[in-house]
Amino acid sequence: MWCKTSVLIDCGVDWFTTSSLDDPTSTLLCLKADSLLRQEERKGFYVKPWRMAGYHGYRCGRVEMGMRSDGACVRLSSDLAASYWWDLYQITGRCSRIDVQATLRCEGAVNDEISAMNDMAHSFFAERQGGPKITWWGNSEGGSTLYLGARQSSWYFRAYNKEAESGEDVWARCVRVELEIKNRMCESAIAYMLSQDTVQVGLLSLLQDHMTNRGIVTKLTPAVPHSFYECPRIVTDERQSLSWLRSAVRPTVQRLLDRGLVHEVMDGLGLHYPPNENLDHPGSE
């Protein structure tokens, strides 16, 4: 069973949404968000327009920021949320959504562990009234996800195959459990996390209590990992573009080059010919 044999390798805040309702706070929030956006741009993400619920602004990588007549809104995701959520919360003192996650490496098949969680939840609520909506989902590419609750509810739990979802070797044999907390529940959850020895201990306790109260046997709290919020290889927009270039464009370009169409390829790509270089015979003196 995964709760006995798995290893906790990561935990943290995975999503954070905050907003401001007055001009001074909006200015401070946007200044901080803009610095994070520029940081993401330097990492290789692209700046794009962003709109949501009347807010207009920009998104770049793992940060979204916007303004409307009554204030500003900023959303952080993934390891950027883990690293900077507290900075933003200190500015606004407000939160409308916070997600906490724990990631564990399993000895057995990840999808079997998620299926076991599904069975435990169904068994626990079989003779109880008012249990959460239980949804199990899988696909042909190896993905598997268990949902407890409804998307619009204040507490929304999911467990999924992180390796299949990410495609990254760093998450091999990993199951991720997440708790999405929204609206009025956010501030009480944050207060609880801050009341513990560390925020990580607090969020692991939140996850463990939520799962236990829904029949899923777990044991998250004894050991807190050294978090690796910044993974060794962040998949930026630039990396995705280069990956697409290698997989989708390079084969076609190579076929044309093999047929001797060097000048035509250079012209088609809008590239300038290198000076003083014989492109027809690259190996000649």
Image: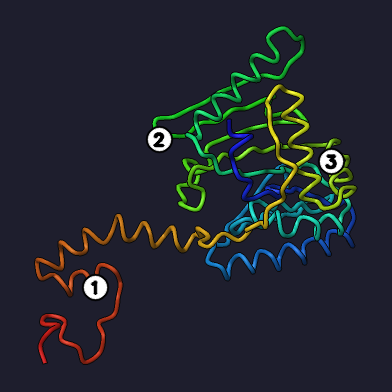
Q: Tell which of 238 and 12 is nearer to you.
A: 12
Looking at marks 1 and 3 on the same chain, the residue that comes earlier in the sequence is marked by 3
Q: The disc labelled 3 sits on which kind of residue?
A: Ala
Mark 1 vs 2: CB contact within 8 A = no
Residue at the spot x=87%, y=48% of the render?
Answer: 196
Indicate the position of residue 186 as horizontal and vertical percent values: 83, 40
**Mark 3 Cα within 10 Å, few/some/many (few <14, many 20+)?**
some
Q: Which residue is mark 3?
A: 189
Which residue bears the numbered disc 2? 141
- Name the quadrant containing residue 82: bottom right
Quarter occupied by the N terminus: top right
Relative depth, front residue between 194 and 86:
194
User: Where does the image place residue 48, in percent across and percent down from the top left?
Assistant: 57, 58
Q: Given the image, on which type of amino acid does mark 2 rest? A: Glu
Judge the density around disc 2: few (<14), some (14-19), many (≥20) Cα neighbours within 10 Å: few
Q: Is residue 57 visible?
A: no
Q: Residue at x 73, y 16 (%)?
A: 131
Q: CA distance from mark 1 to mark 2?
A: 38 Å
Q: Which residue is mark 1?
A: 266
- Element under label 3? helix
2 is higher (above) or lower (below) than 223: above
Q: Is residue 266 visible?
A: yes
Kindly indicate the quadrant of the structure image that contains residue 118.
top right
Q: From the viewer's perspective, is the residue at label 1 or at label 3 nearer?
A: 3
Q: Earlier in the sequence, mark 1 or mark 2?
A: 2
Along the horizontal axis of the image, is 279 left or right of 16? left
- In percent of width and height, residue 203 lies at 77, 44
**Relative to the observer, which residue lies in front, 130 or 274?**
130
Q: Nearer the viewer, mark 1 or mark 2?
A: 2
Q: Residue furthest top?
A: 127
Is residue 247 shown above or below 127? below
Residue at (69% x, 65% y) in the render: 36
